[in-house]
Amino acid sequence: MLTAMGYAVCAASTAQAAGFLLREQSAAGMGNAFAGATAGAEDGSYSFYNPAGIIRQAGTQASVNATAIIGDAKGYNATGNGKYQRQMDHVVDKKVLPSVALTHALNSRTSFGLSLSAPFGLVTDYSPTWVGANHGTLSDLTTYNLTPMLAYRATCNLTLGAGLVVQYIDANLKSGTMQNMGALPYNDIVANMKGDDTSLGYIVGALYEFSPRTRVGVSYRSEVKHKLKGEVSFNRNIPQAGIVNQDIDASVKTPALLTFGAYHDITRKWSVMAEAQKTYWSSFDNLVINGHKSGVLSYTEENWKDVWFFSLGTSYRVSDDLKLRFGVAYDVTPVSDAYRTPRIPDSDRTWFTTGAEYKLTDNMTLNAGYAYIRAKKNRVNLNGTGYDQTRGPLTAQYKGNIHLFAAGINYRF
């Protein structure tokens, strides 16, 4: 049986390890459901998906984007700790993602780029007294990537690109009121864990242009291995039960991504694009939490699986100044039914997107994007055994959707 201390950190660790991939780094890309993002290279924001694409940006350009994530996910029919709760509203909290990209053509064959993005993030927020508080209340995870990159035109058709990814990760996770803790006669204990780290990864890509109208791209973003360091604190310390404030560390990986994209101008007005991305979530095989006073606090099997994301898109040029975008996508969850938790009640999702691009001046372009994401209904069914023994059993159902609103501005100096 886990000690109370082991319970608290293990419960809080789930969201850290799982992470949540955020593709929303480009308002223009969102309009097409990120279809063809690896090949599109329509502005500097596409450098997040393929560094080779910056070769298509003339002169010196800046792209600034922001995406608001507004979740409408609900939990219902939750049973835990001998209690029943009919509904939990606003499980997925609001979050705003920034993205900035700068590109500069050094010469006709070489371009330099620098981007700031937030590729992984999650906010789930429950009442501190909900029936599943033993399994977690707040899960707030954010990563920021700073990526310098180079693109080199190796031949008239082929461009190669590479970038160094400097990734910062920050986590704040809480568990609410603990009850039914087996042999430990302690109630109303609240755990709060914070930790962060900065580590390195890389991204490589290639862009092949069959003609001015048709191009394909491929990119690979490496996993990034982190060792988070921070502390766990409690609203009250009980040393005899192992419940004491202390420093902690945990090894966490953000997954690798392999992406393929294609872009084609059918006519001067119509374009089509497609994308396929594999995310290697299976790198989350286990998670070990170490306390600097208590040694190994918990060992958790994550058992996530590698999954695919597929999208199709089209664009219509209304005029030389106005372009409309549309897209659809299907996103497969890496979480199997047996390992789903209330911290990340994830499920398969279908995307429907639209957007618009308007050329304000010869040097300035504005983009707007909207996505409606419909999540498949799912269920959390934890039996309270193994690592869940001190948390107790929990069952709950989830349904909902997410709205994404993106805006971007591109300026050529």
Image: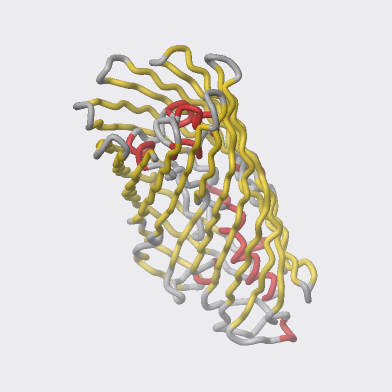
Q: In front: 308, or 82?
A: 308
In the rendered image, residue 19, in percent from the top left (x then y), is placed at 55, 52
| In-image side of 356 versus 328 (left or right) | left
In the rendered image, residue 369, in percent from the top left (x then y), is placed at 31, 42
Q: Which quadrant of the figure has residue 35?
A: top left
In the rendered image, residue 353, in percent from the top left (x then y), is placed at 31, 38
Q: Residue at x 23, y 27 (%)?
A: 320
In the rendered image, residue 66, in percent from the top left (x then y), is placed at 38, 51
Q: In front: 27, or 83?
A: 27
Q: How many marks?
A: 0
Residue 327 position (above or below residue 130): above
Q: Which quadrant of the figure has residue 63?
A: top left
Q: Residue at x 64, y 51 (%)?
A: 302
Quarter of the image where the C terminus is located: top left
| In-image side of 162 versus 103 (left or right) | right
Q: Which quadrant of the figure has residue 76?
A: bottom left
Please, which residue is most extreme toward the top here? 211
Q: Residue at x 55, y 67 (%)?
A: 172
Residue 138 position (above or below residue 216): below
| In-image side of 194 versus 42 (left or right) | right
Residue 411 position (above or below residue 381): above
